[in-house]
Amino acid sequence: MFFLFTPSLSLILCSFFCRADMNKNCSQQCSKSDSFSGDSDFKVNLKSLLESLAENGPVLNGFYSTSKGKSSTQIFGLVQCRGDISANNCGSCIKNSSVFALSECPESRDVVIWFRWCFLRYSTDNFLGVLDQTSVAVLNDTNYDDPSLVSDGQSLMAGLASSVPYQSLMFQIAVLEGGVRGKRYGMAQCTRDISGSDCGLCLNAQLDAFRTTIGSKKDWEVYGFNCFMWWKNHLELFWSVDDGSDVL
């Protein structure tokens, strides 16, 4: 199940599930169909953009933004991989998300694709460096958590929101020791085209907007245009809380 929050924080509810740490699409947004079948310049620019993102994203620490073309056919794009994903998996995800975008949004000039391992966005509007707090919340089909852990978990995620803007990759994982109730894991990340202050605003807005919606679910993920937050009751495939991660 997922919830879509627009920048004004209104709510749309849809059915959706995104289970396990496999590289699968979790959501997408396509602008209203604006056929460019006869616009050869735009198609050439889009092809060049997607190729450039796929080539450079994996070798530049999982993040790359650029633009192609000029004037009315100029298109801006960005890719970002999750901070714990290898370069090979990053490259694979970017290629898959590009194919998915062209398949699912074939006549759209403004496209956002969320995969579990990476994020792709392109638009004819220059969105680079501009904070957009639109987000999608994915609530996986898990039971409600221990009430005492919910409060501690919110504190842990708030700590990540404060810390991530100062990390070199704007990415961080943390673990909450729950004793006999087990561990809980948190992750937060921002796209690296925005400033540290905007990163903090984005993450805190997600916390505020989703606190009542998410409630006490054991497992949830928030995918935004500029930031992402996960709360898990299990260790994800590539996470290593013993190497470079914080225990809060």
Image (cartoon, rainbow, N blue to C red):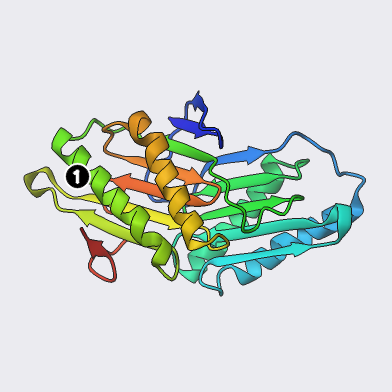
Can you see residue 233? no
| Residue 49 relative to residue 206: left or right | right
- Residue toward you, 199 or 37: 199
Q: Where is residue 239? Give x, y as percent.
A: 32, 61
Quarter of the picture holding the C terminus = bottom left
Which residue ends up furthest to the left in the rendered image? 180
Q: Is residue 109 left or right of residue 15?
A: right
Q: Image check: 161 left or right of 45?
A: left
Residue at horizontal 45%, vertical 59%?
82
The structure residue drawn at horizontal position 49% and vertical position 38%, both measured from the top left corner, is: 136
Direction front: furthest residue: 197
Please identify the quadrant where the N terminus is shown. Answer: top left
Query: Residue most toward the bottom?
Result: 59
Image location of residue 183, percent across then percent down: 18, 50
Is residue 170 visible in the rendered structure shown here? yes
Q: How many marks?
A: 1
> Where's residue 75, x and y in %?
77, 56
Where 228 falls versus 171 (above or below)? above
Q: Which residue is mark 1?
A: 152
Q: Residue at x 27, y 54 (%)?
A: 235
Q: For mark 1, does the 10 Å Cα neighbourhood hold few (<14), some (14 to 19), or many (20 or more) residues?
A: some
Q: In terms of depth relative to the viewer, which is nearer, 246 or 88?
A: 246
Numbered disc 1: secondary structure: helix
Where 12 sits versus 126, above or below?
above
Name which residue type carries label 1. Asp
Expressed as whole percent of the image width and height from the top left, the position of residue 213 reads 37, 29
